[in-house]
Amino acid sequence: MFSSRSTPLARFCAVAAAIMVLASCGGGSGGGGFVPLAPVAQPQPQPETPVATHAIGGTLSGITSGKLVLQNNAGDDLTLTADGKFSFATPIKEGSAYAVTVRTQPLWQFCTVSNGSGSAAAEVAGVTVTCAEARATVSTLAGSGTEGMLDGNGLSAEFARPRGVRVDAAGNLYVTDTRYKLIRKVSPSGAVTTVAGSGAGGTLSDPFDLALDAAGNIYLTELMGNTVRKVTPAGAVSTLAGSGSFSSVDGHGTSASFNQPSGIAFDAQNNLFIGDSQGRKIRKIAPDLEVSTFAGSGAQGTDDGTGTSATFSVPAGIAMDAAGNMFVTDFGSHVIRKITPQGVVTTPLGKRSTSGSGDGKGNDATFSFPVGIAIDSSGSLYVADSTAHVIRRITPDGMVRTLAGTAGRPGAKDDVGKAASFNTPYGVAVDAAGNVYVADQFNHKIRKITPTPAP
């Protein structure tokens, strides 16, 4: 058993511990009371000197359509669509370098930057960006010029009166090659193959124009066959709509009829619209293959109006914009018609029943039997003006300009702008970069028009 009484050693240790506690608390001082520890002084944060920042900006001039994207110091993207003052969203520190550059050019223009770099000692407002029209450089992508049907690469291939042309997302072209009733494919490098017609998946009858869907199917109009056909990626040909008779009767699929169908285009809801040229109507084929009349009474004329109260002369090519508006070349009256999604028909471009090739704005411009029409991402239109032998470009403000070729001068010359020549161009297409492709009918070639900077 341990003793409950403390030993001398235990009493000594207890006393020593008490003395140490008192000493640490100041208990041994003369005051005999509790003395607190002095607070330790902490360093105080010093206020930061503010750093001045300055905005970087300037003035843009000369842009006519599309979007220009500028960058400062390889970032801080700024998208501009109209002339005027501009300023980047992010200011930079005083003394820092700035460098304004062009990231993305607007379609069919080239913009240059002046006074675009330096060190920011104050607000920068003197950067100058000037845009100028691109030159239209015309080349031959495919076709020797000899009328024929040979596949091959570039100029070794042959075409026979190509009329319709479309470009897919990968840059492949699809062409209706009329005389031998073929659908041809032209790769971006110019390799030409036959994908339908003449026993390749099924026979065709007078293919005129074509449209493409996202799955790679081709839809084409047969002018004298009076049908709308479908070609699968495997090359199988079937009839989508049209009985083959020369009439213009609504109905379902092949129970409906067309009278020389020409232009064809999809809207965002996968409806197909057809320029029924001798039916003088715009026809609609719904996804369920129900065929209806969207606009046009069937009488020949140029009257504006809504739906079937409007009249057409010979509706040919069709292009659809992002808002669902349709632009139709009215071949027989030398004008471009516009049809809203509600079916309201107007005539914004060209002079009714007046053939010509004059550039100008809206109804001051003239066309000569326009056929193919295409639209780019900026909303600019491209028109194959067939008997003027030129390609026209129309900006969203309605200004019509001759992009390439000289009116009244047929030929096959590759060159720049008006020095180039075409022979009855029928089809036209445009890719995402603004390159324009032309089915040059009586030259038996596929031509390419590339935007290039002026020297």
Image (tube, grey):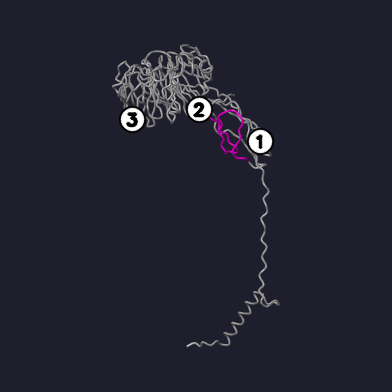
Cα gap from disc 2 to disc 1, whole angstroms: 30 Å
Q: Amino acid at mark 1?
A: Val
Q: Nearer the viewer, residue 417 or 401?
A: 401
Q: Nearer the viewer, mark 2 or mark 3?
A: 2
**Is-magenta flag for residue 72?**
yes
Disc 2: which residue: 378
Q: Nearer the viewer, residue 192 or 107?
A: 107
Residue 26 at what x, y percent from top left? 67, 75
385 in relation to 452, above or below: above
Residue 228 at what x, y percent from top left? 34, 22
Part of the protein shown in magenta: 66-91
Q: Tags 1 and 3 in contact by the CB under 8 Å rule? A: no
Mark 1: few/some/many CA within 10 Å (<14, 14-19, 20+): many
Q: Earlier in the sequence, mark 2 or mark 1?
A: 1
Cα gap from disc 2 to disc 3, whole angstroms: 33 Å
20 in relation to 311, above or below: below
Disc 3: which residue: 234
Q: Amino acid at mark 2?
A: Ser
Residue 451 at what x, y percent from top left? 53, 25
